[in-house]
Amino acid sequence: MSHSGALPSPSLPALFTPFRLGDLELKNRVVMAPLTRNRANKHDDAPNALNVEYYRQRAGAGLIITEATQISQQGQGYIWTPGIYRDEHIAGWKTVTDAVHAAGGVIFMQLWHVGRVSHLSLQPGNQPPVAPSALQAKTKTYIESGFAEVSEPRALRLDEIPGIVADFVRGAQNAKAAGFDGVELHGAHGYLLDQFLRDGSNKRDDAYGGSIANRARLTLEVVDAVTKVFPKERVGIRISPVSPANDARDRNPQEVFGYLVQELDRRGIGFIHVVEGATREARDYLPFDYQALRKAFRGAYIANNGFTRALAVETVAKGEADLVAFGRLFIANPDLPERLRLDAPLNEPDAATFYGGDAKGYTDYPALGRPAGAPVAG
């Protein structure tokens, strides 16, 4: 697939024009980034009516990518995050996709295994989390009592790795059953796939460790398996080459991610979603040539991290990205694409309500000219 989309009109920046992703027509190039909000049902981790309203309000995005969704209980790292491995998860997510589609939106699910970024209290039988190697991450997670240090993991045995791939496949199959248009694999921010990729967290000496090709093996096996469930153009992956999130470290990220993207291009997947820089405002956290990834990949390039309206407009106009994903701005602005197009004022996000809670700071941000909770035009 070539870098293509509708030609912009002279008066409308390309960011606000349609884009063709495989066989999907996206109405604009503003993407809602995955955002963990910890508001799934407390008893079964299934989506609920509040989640339906939250995503429906944001259906004006060209593409919604859901919050990270665990493919198994073992893949869970935070309390009250949604799953996609039980019937009630499928049923809950079906109500979300139905609402987004009714509002004219396109929605992909982000499939997630956290690996070592977890806590004994969240794991089956209070067992240690799993990882490429038995190295505890220097990071915290969110459990019922609040933020806590992650637990020490155990190394996955070689004979367990096919089961991880199978869990991603089941997640993709369940996402399809729930009505999703496609899936994004979470290969970023120090979670399981990223842990295998990086030499700071992967000290294995078998077929999944050592060389860059070996460390990329699990990610590519998951891609190969999931593209048998969804058409390859409807599969993407999120990567964060230099982000230090969750103790993610590598001595040579340019070479690692250069190799990975070259292999992803060979497979013809729909997009790479690249967190440019660290997790928040630090876009120049470490030197990295993102345009080298862009040039190596024929699918769509989604850029993410600290984009303002001006930077997003410029980045797409210059062809440095096909689409731009926004996170925090989408939390506070359900109608973000409309606000950006009109260059209207933006609501400020309330960080105190990001994780857990109820409608406050979740579905009560006002849209332009409408009170909070009123329908937002798609």
Image (cartoon, rainbow, N blue to C red):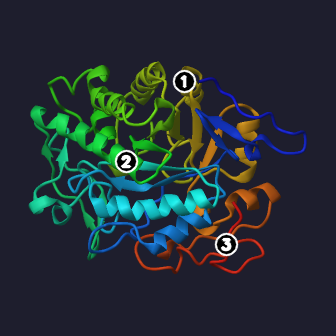
**Residue under numbered circle 3:** 375
Taking the image as shown, residue 188 lies to the left or right of residue 360, namely left
Amino acid on which disc 1 is placed: Phe
Residue 113 appears at what percent x and percent y?
29, 48
Quadrant location of the N terminus in the rendered image: top right
Look at the picture and state if 62 lies above or below 274.
below
Residue shown at 48%/76% (left/top)?
352
The disc placed on residue 111 is 2
Q: Which mark is residue 257?
A: none
- Identity, as a three-letter code, of the amino acid under mark 2: Leu
Q: Nearer the viewer, residue 266 or 256?
A: 266
Q: Establish if 23 lies above or below 120.
A: above
Q: Is residue 48 above or below residue 315?
A: below
Give the amino acid type for the residue marked by disc 3 in the picture.
Answer: Pro
Going from the N terminus, do you reach mark 1 or mark 3 first? 1
Which quadrant of the rendered structure holds the C terminus? bottom right
Residue 137 in the image: x percent, y percent? Answer: 25, 50
Q: Nearer the viewer, residue 216 or 232?
A: 232
Q: CA distance from mark 1 to mark 3?
A: 38 Å
- Mark 2 element type: strand
Which element is circle 1 on? loop
Residue behind mark 1: 297
Q: What residue sits 24% from the left and 62% below the top?
A: 149
